[in-house]
Amino acid sequence: MTVLGIDPGYAIIGYGVISAENCNFNPIAYGCITTDADTDFNLRLKIIFDGMNKVIEKAKPDCIAIEKLYFQNNQKTAIMVAEARGVILLAAQLHNIPIFEYTPLQVKTAVTGYGKAKKQQVMDMTKRLLKLRQMPKPDDAADALAIAVCHVQAAGTCLRQKLISGIN
């Protein structure tokens, strides 16, 4: 299974592509789509859409895992991230790729086993699971990899395989 994890935003959109087979994770690609703060917001949405299409076309993922929005304070930022997230979801939909959404709590729980894990703990566990020498920078790319790992863990793929192989 090839999973494209996405950490949505409008200035920096992190993406991480992993493959998971026989309970082994393999990082394929990761990076960020960035937009300049001085650029008209509508043009920024187009840049995000075009960039996401390129990532999808190159990675050819079986599914997309994206973080659900969670905002407490700034409504303006929340609306802008929601608009950016909308063009990301549109790109996925136009490629007929199944989309799965996860809250930050679900990502932390799936990756570390603890829903209140600190960001550094999630990054450290993601690094271990993907056998990376160092975590990608910026953090948005690392977060996207964690979201992709979360999907594989949440899908139960490894657990089901271990249960089945234990029975046979």
Image (cartoon, rainbow, N blue to C red):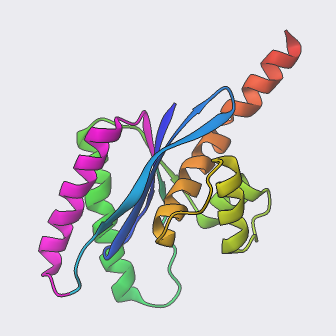
127 is higher (above) or lower (below) than 18: below
Residue 56 horizontal/vertical position (percent)? 30, 43
Q: Is residue 41 left or right of residue 60?
A: left
Residue at image x 25%, y 59%?
87
Rendering coords of residue 152 (x, y %) = 61, 40
- The residues colored magenta run 38-64
Tell me if residue 89 is in the magenta stretch.
Answer: no
Give x and y (percent) for residue 94. Answer: 23, 41
**Which residue corresponds to the image point at 23% horizontal and 48% vertical from the top-left?**
54
Give me the residue at 26% from left, 38% from top: 95
Residue 57 located within the stretch drawn in magenta: yes
Q: Residue at x 12, y 72 (%)?
A: 43
Is 42 above or below relative to 90?
below
Percent across and percent down for residue 147 are: 55, 55
Toward the viewer: 145 or 43? 145
Horizontal side of 77 relative to 166 (left or right) equals left
The residue most toward the bottom is 73
The answer to which image quadrant residue 127 occupies is bottom right
Q: Main secondary structure of the magenta part?
A: helix
